[in-house]
Amino acid sequence: MDGEIDPEDVQALLETPQPPRIVDIRSKAAFTREHIPGSDNIPFATLPQQIEQLRDADRIVTVCPHGKASIQAARLIKSYEGTTNARVESMRGGLSAWPGELEPTVEQAVEDGPESPF
């Protein structure tokens, strides 16, 4: 792991031509409710089986609710031979510290449907 990164710095990096890969390690249900736009959901429990998906990433930022479990996820990702050259960081303070907007998964928004007129 290459340390922690402040949420404001992550937000700024997302606006660059080569943004980092944001890995949200919460459950699918929590991710569906809301997440950082453009982030990927790889729940912590399935990370060892899905870590191969991160092989080509140059920079990875892990995210969890409060920035604790994401440290462990960043360490695990950094130890994988396919990501040893990537910069891997945990977002300090987690989603509770995120300064930007969070969005629901499109499927969730559609599933909720339009507001009833009754």
Image (cartoon, rainbow, N blue to C red):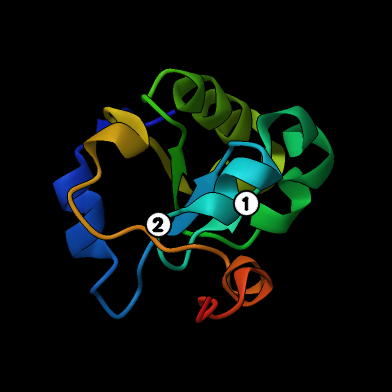
Residue 53 in picture, x, y percent from top left: 72, 57
Label 2 packing within 10 angstroms: few (<14), some (14-19), many (20+): many
From where the camera sits, is residue 77 visible?
yes
Residue 22 in picture, x, y percent from top left: 46, 54
Amino acid beneath label 1: Asn
From where the camera sits, is residue 91 visible?
no
Label 1 packing within 10 angstroms: few (<14), some (14-19), many (20+): many
- Above or below, 65 against 104 in this view is above
* Residue at screen point 67% across, 31% down: 44
Asked which secondary structure carries label 1, the reply is strand
Label for residue 67? none
Is 56 or 107 nearer to us in this picture? 107
Amino acid beneath label 2: Ile
Label for residue 36? 2
- Residue named by callout 1: 41
* Residue at screen point 37% across, 24% down: 66
Residue 50 in picture, x, y percent from top left: 78, 46
